[in-house]
Image: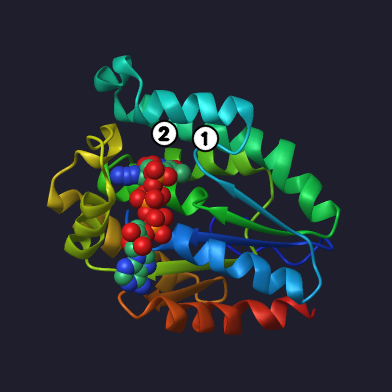
Amino acid sequence: MKPTESTSRRFPGLFVTFEGSEGSGKTTQIERLVSRIEAAGPEVEVTREPGGTEIGEEIRHLLKHGSIGKEMCPETELLLFAASRAQLVREVILPCLEAGKVILCDRFLDSTTVYQGVARRISADPVNTINRFAIGDIMPDLTVVLDVPAEVGLSRIRHRASDLPDRMEQENIGFYHKVREGYLVLAKSFPDRFVVVDGTLPTEEIEEIIWDAICPLLNK
Ligand code: Z5A
């Protein structure tokens, strides 16, 4: 199985991931969807990458804010994201799916494919192999990409941020153009799993589009 192919629904739960560049509105949409899904019946669990477990949150700190992070080479970065993911899959995602919950995850393996693979230019073979090792065979049932021009996403987070940009937010604009393009290419290659939503639309409209994509899966 290629790591970007959909897994058929083997579990009673539903696994939905949210992708897109920084400031694309992932957190905003996840927050809005929780109560809506719960009103339809299933229990919802929200998690994020990197992070979502005690080990993962330590790795997140190292990747984003650790004082030694400046020296980090792209290969180490790739392995740290994968380590956080391996823990999250086994400690949180798999048990939730087995328990019939809906799990909404802010970023997952596609972030690695795009950020470390496309934008940092690590070749696809190691990225896919490491991704596959980290996830076992747990793939999202649906991946929502919130698509915004790099300039829009960055201006949103710079307005929001009261503190300095973290290590991952210090790249030049070209890096974020590659990220956006990377997501669009990936989504085109796997149309059964991905839905791409214009992240510049009003928040309520985006929520409706995502809801329309999730709803049929809730009823399966
Ligand atoms: N990364 C990686 O390289 N490899 C990997 O494998 C993984 C991650 C898993 C994680 O950062 C970093 O790690 C990220 C990718 C990399 N790095 N970079 N650079 P994070 O978890 O700290 O942050 P993020 O995932 O990039 O998300 P974010 O910055 O928190 O943004 P967001 O969640 O997508 O957006 P938001 O917080 O919902 O909204 C941002 C602002 O826009 C906020 O003020 C909202 O009110 C506003 N907003 C939201 N929607 C709208 C609409 N529709 N219109 C107008 N304004 C809006």
**In the picture, which quadrant includes the C terminus?**
bottom right
Disc 1 under 8 Å from ligand 1? The reply is yes
> Is the residue marked 2 within 8 Å of ligand 1, measured from its CB?
yes
Percent of width and height locating residue 141? 65, 66
Helix, strand or loop status at disc 2:
helix
Hey, which residue is sitting farthest top in the picture? 68
Task: Find numbered disc 1 in the image and state the secondary structure of the residue it sits on.
Answer: helix
Name the spot of residue 17 as percent of width and height, x first: 56, 59
Vertical placement of residue 66 versus 189, above or below: above
Q: Is residue 107 visible?
A: yes
- Identity, as a three-letter code, of the amino acid under mark 1: Ala
* Quadrant assignment, res 198: bottom left
x 75%, y 74%: residue: 39
The residue carrying mark 2 is 78
211, 108: nearer the viewer? 211
Q: Identify whether 187 is placed above or below 1.
A: below
| Residue drawn at x 50%, y 68% as measured from the top left | 144
* CB contact under 8 Å: marks 2 and 1: yes
Q: Quadrant of residue 163?
A: top left
Residue named by callout 1: 82
User: What is the C-alpha distance between the residues marked 2 and 1?
Assistant: 6 Å
